[in-house]
Amino acid sequence: MATPKKGRSASAQSKPGRSLALILIAIAALTGGMFASGHTTPRLGIDLAGGTSITLRAVPEAGNESAINKTNMDTAVSIMERRVNGLGVSESEVQTQGRENIIVNIPKGTNSEQARKQVGTTAKLYFRPVLATEVSGGGTAPSPSPTGSPSGQPSGKASDKPEATDKGSGSPSASPTTQGRAVTDALKADATPSASASDPAKSSPSPSASGGSDAAAGKLQEQYAKLDCTDEKTRSTVGDTAKASDPTLACGQNAQGQWQKYILGPAEVDGTDVDKAQAVLNTQTGAGWTVTMDFTDGGAKKFADITGKLAQNQSPQNQFAIVLDGDVVSDPYVRQALTGGNAEISGNFNQQSAQELANMLTYGALPLTFKVDSMTTVTAALGGDQLQAGLIAGAIGLALVVIYLLAYYRGLSFIAILSLLVSAALTYTIMSLLGPTIGFALNLPAVCGAIVAIGITADSFIVYFERVRDEIREGRSLRPAVERAWPRARRTILVSDFVSFLAAAVLFIVTVGKVQGFAFTLGLTTLLDVVVVFLFTKPLLTLMARRPFFANGHKWSGLDPKSLGAQPPLRRTRRPAAPVDPKEA
Amino acid sequence: MSKLGNLGARLHRGEVGYDFVKNRKIWYGLSILITITAIVGLAVRGLNMGIEFQGGAVFNTPKNTAASVTQAEEYAEEASGHDAIVQKLGDGSLRIQVAGIDTGAANEIKNTLADDLKIDPEQINAELVGPSWGEQIANKAWQGLGIFLVLVVIYLAIAFEWRMAVAAFVALIHDITITVGIYALVGFEVTPGTVIGLLTILGYSLYDTVVVFDSLKEQTKDLTKQTRWTYSDVANRSINSTLVRSINTTVVALLPVAGLLFIGGGVLGAGMLNDISLSLFVGLAAGAYSSIFIATPLVADLKEREPQMKALRKRVLAKRAQSAAKGETDVHEDESYAGEPEDDAAPAVVGPRNQPASRTRGRGRPSGKRR
């Protein structure tokens, strides 16, 4: 009876040691990971640990002062909220202050510079056709005219000029290769003069166009000649006042860090046409981190139209520029109409900047432009003494739980307490690790929620223990009782945990902000509950049932048949029944 | 343990037990009373929404304000009569936020605050702040809640049956109403923490009800195949047999929260903990109570209206009348003391056992082998 029977099916129950080893390894790995990452405590929310407060002021637009109104401010707040709180777990707070300010509070340990960028960027996105472009100013590179020779800077431009391809069609573009580059530049160089022929409508302001009739275009041309993109001041102002429907000037940085200037046509597609964006590591073309966008139906059609038109042009007029807040982020060229309903922005991205941009494109542009007014640290919204009081109170409460379990379950309570400890260790390490990875921050309500989760975790093994005791009352010895009680307890645990998990999943998908953060914590603790009961409590009880202390129903084991009120006659007749055991579920 | 253990054993054998189903009208009445009180409290006093929901005023004191955060909090709460959130900024100034204040009141409070903090009122910068828990967050939360409730009712209707889904839903509404009502009566400010607390309760209430229903479902499985017990009898046995589990779970869940509420909030004076732990405490207690006293009797009520169950009741009553003399008590004792006689002695009886036996017991092996 003391050795496991070989005939048993290879279910988890038959190899309790394996499950226990698994969970212990998991804990060890998580703890190791926690120390290796250097984040040994969960990140705390503003209410517990304080953080950084950013004040943003709306910048009035000339001629449109009334744009700073409650509606636009509220929209800006909700967009910023979603940008800094994408997953809903970072516990950032965004609120308006006064008529034209927005305060953003982010918890300690968040990269505040990154957060500042996230909330301060307007993220107005336009796809504009390129009418002319060249490297701008400075001694870093020669600045060839649009008609310059192909030898001007063969390597300079090309690498930030990937080909725009349909993600779907996946035609492998040769753009980053040397040949591709040479071709591009050669094409670009000699093609410019003839560009007007292919698309006169759009190329009027371009250098080769005969658009002298258009005074504005001429002026733009003049400004373009003077534009020096290496000057930071010039850069920050150029194109800022441009309307989407007008041609404009813009600056952008190529892969070599050189500044390039552009004349761009009217916007054909804009940020509102983007349905969803995400950061992708493009290994296929070697473009590194890119941002892919899925267009809305209308956007996809517009995009197909413009790329179809551009593809017929010669370089550089077969390029379009992706302009974000007046800066050209990327200027791919097109060979064919892109009808896949998605596009890819490549450029100087690393993982973080790609994710940031994707995030902003997904949540949309701010209706107003904001300037950061001040950035300062703030202390915890709850005083430190309150947190301490809470911790003391929580510890007393937990001590009471332990005493209660000891008094009621005696020996069995060690399994209960160990299970709670395992659950606590898993929760703590996972939460600590989620801080740096997804920005998870723990606020006071979440701490309280975790305390309630103790109750739910404890319930799982209380259900199980009571089942085992009922079996013993029916006259079974411990080992069959443990195995027999399990399938039923398991069902109860799964059915009820499913309800909790359903709540967590639905709320996490649908809601935003703090509710989403709550849903995340609930889902995590529910899953851990199931993991702990299946991989720890049950196997441990199976192992313990082999110990004489429990199996013989020692008075202090909590499984004493006599004090549980099992029926004596049945006890006597029980021994021969032992072989029944292997057949049990 | 022995006393409690014995109680558990006797509950298990059905020697003791409280007739929850028979006395349900009392508990329905009690619940209706509490719910009405809660609704009246809600209607009369209303909820005191915190700054996160309705916005308020923010006062920025000049650099290097001498007063401590705690002091400033006291002053601000005294001056405004509302909860205040005070944070110290990097340059040593204080940011004091107070809920539910309009421009007029803000000026008054500014002057009082300036007096208390011994600063020139001109140096305090007062502005109105908007809610950080904006309409969009609230709307999405409601939407999520709605979808969840629909899904959970569907799930319960499939996993159990629609009557149980209805009863679980009623119990849920009952718990939430009571918690919100008591919140209104006590007059604490509603913060995001409160909302999170309410959501936690929502989850817990359903969880607890499902655990109780799971046992009920198991025990009523082959109910119509016997004629000794009505649905109500079995439902009652089911509650009693899971009573020990319910008590233990409730104690374990409530103890830490009670610690937060009474020791943390009460003795140590951590005011902010109160609002969360109160909603949790009331909600958890209500959740445990409603699973036993409301949800299960309600299922019994609904079930007894089913023609099948009506017929069963008739048969049971007829049989009881028949064996009136020897009757119930004997049968009952047989049941309790013989352990599991039903395999051979009374094959039809399934319902009232805690372990309804028939499902797994004796499957695939002669019943005699066990003895």
Image (spheres, helix red, strand yellow):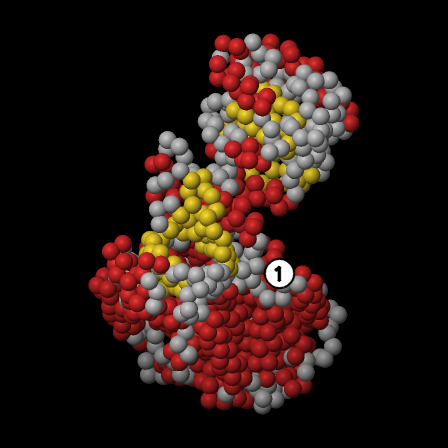
Q: Which residue is mark 1?
A: A433
In this rendering, the answer to whether A469 lies above or below B351 is below
Q: At x 34% / y 68%, what residue is drawn? A: B118
**B367 horizontally vs B327: left or right:** right
Q: At x 40% / y 51%, what residue is drawn? A: A95
Q: Amino acid at mark 1?
A: Leu
Residue B153: where, in percent of width, then height? 41, 55
Q: At x 63% / y 84%, what residue is drawn? A: A550
Please say whether residue A133 is visible from this viewpoint. yes
**A468 horizontally vs A163: left or right:** left
Residue closer to the observer: A213 or A364: A213
Q: At x 34% / y 77%, what residue is drawn? A: B19
Q: Quadrant of residue A228?
A: top right
Residue A344: where, in percent of width, then height? 61, 33
Residue closer to the observer: A404 or A74: A74
Provide the chain ID for the residue under circle 1: A
Residue closer to the observer: A315 or A532: A315
**A329 horizontally vs A386: left or right:** right
Residue B212: where, in percent of width, then height? 44, 68
Residue A295: where, in percent of width, then height? 53, 32
Mark 1, secondary structure of its residue: helix
